[in-house]
Image (cartoon, helix red, strand yellow):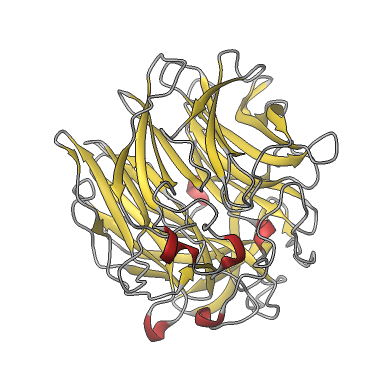
Amino acid sequence: MKHADATAHATRDPRAMIDRDAATGPKRNIDTRTPATSRRIDLIGTAGILGTILGGVATATPGVDSRDLDPPAAPGAYAVQTTPDGDGIITSWIEAGSSPGMVAIRFSRLSSDPDDSTSLAWSPAQTMIASDDLFANWADRPAIQRGTDGALIGHRLRKIGTGTYAYGVMLSRSEDEGRTWSDTGWLHDDDKAVEHGFVSAVPTREGLRYVWLDGRQMTPGSGHDGHGDGHGAGGAMSLRTAVLDAGSDSKTITSTALDARVCECCDTDLAMTGEGPVAVYRDRGPNEERDIFIVRETEEGWTTPMPVARDGWVFPACPVNGPSVSASGAEVVVAWFTAAGDEGPRVLASRSGDHGRTFSPPTTVARSTIGRTDVLMLPEGDALVLWMDRREPAAGGFAAPVDARDDSGSVALRRLSRDGVLGPATLVESMDLGRRAGFPRLELLPADEAGGRDAKVILVWRDEEGDRLRGRAVDLDDLD
């Protein structure tokens, strides 16, 4: 099965999109950036003039009242990932190491500034691991979670064998807030020289619940090497899950299969409902349908995989464009990219009010898009959907957003109300559409009531022009 990036921007026809790196595959510590062409929009005071599209008519209105809040990452950092951490947010990324061939995973925590509780501040950046055996990849990102016993638990991709796509998910643990780390072993209960990755995690009463893509059914060496038809001949990628026990310094070695045939390189995502965790992922049907599916953990165990919606997107490769999920109580929202049918590429979202058992018909959130979604449930029950849009923000005044360059667009946001009504789409910031730009991330930072700071939406992404990570804090009241 070919591994094609369906977010590639050289063509508007997703059926013709190909993997530009097919000859070599991802490499460790090699700069795969596309030419730097993105640009920042100008801010007027603290309120940016952001391109807004309302009801299909392009306008320009004062945008969200926001502040720059860039993570303390070195130039060249990429593969940004965020996780909620109580009254803060942990952000991790990949940097070049201190010597040739070395790659470092670094992180920082965003929370209230200890010198001014009404403001936010990043902690000094720390290193989880620096090594020459990491599988560093723009799409399959490492992350750090807060364990249920208070320790920090990180995961990363580490090479298992000599094949390009022979790697596993190694867990590490820190009991001193990230100053020192100890490996605890593989997340998965096999060490086969095949692909394991695209990990998601969520804390539960039993411990950290993980899901990941697992290639143990595949023949070693078949994988994505050469981007040929190895998956068809060498077995299918599966979705598996395991729990890292609370208070334990070693992993649970028994995993459970959730779906025996899934898309090989699309993100998974997890969220916690009032009844338990739900996992969403891109399935791989018998005729190469790439629909979004959900599984739920109940008191009786994991449910049979069910579609969130039947897009019927038939695509003969992995689009590297997984779904996103967020939940609060019984409310669940899922966002995803599809290019099914005559409507073309678009971002869809669907809501559930019964813990993910059933979903509303999908709502089209965006059309001029390459996907790479994230979604966030807001305190009052509305949801905020993020995607990468092909249009660049308006330059100012009442100019319309433009789609003039195939390699440049923007990171975009749109509110989806609890009753299914869409707000205006806001093009927040200009952004390169290449692989190295990766996946913008979205988190909710809770209010600091004692310190007098309101809740904030935190947006983190990679800026190609500046060759750095960017951050933005947005007040909830400023989201339309």
- Residue 151: tell me if it is visible: yes
Q: Position of residue 223 (x, y in %)?
A: 52, 57
330 vs 480, left or right, is: left
Give me the residue at 80% from left, 41% from top: 101
In the depicted structure, whether residue 348 falls above or below residue 28: below
* Quarter occupied by residue 314: bottom left
Q: Position of residue 161 (x, y in %)?
A: 60, 42
Give me the residue at 65% from left, 16% from top: 180
Comparing 450 with 276, the one in front is 276
Comparing 350 with 270, the one in front is 270
Comparing 30 with 435, the one in front is 30
In the displayed orientation, state which residue is furthest to the bottom. Answer: 342
How many discs appear?
A: 0
Q: Position of residue 268 (x, y in %)?
A: 42, 50
Q: Position of residue 400 (x, y in %)?
A: 63, 78
In the depicted structure, whether residue 126 falls above or below residue 215: above
Give me the residue at 72% from left, 29% from top: 125
* Quarter occupied by residue 143: top right
19 vs 454, left or right, is: right
- Residue 377: tell me if it is visible: no
318 vs 472, left or right, is: left
Give me the residue at 51% from left, 78% from top: 14
Comparing 197 with 478, the one in front is 197
In the displayed orientation, state which residue is furthest to the left. Answer: 300
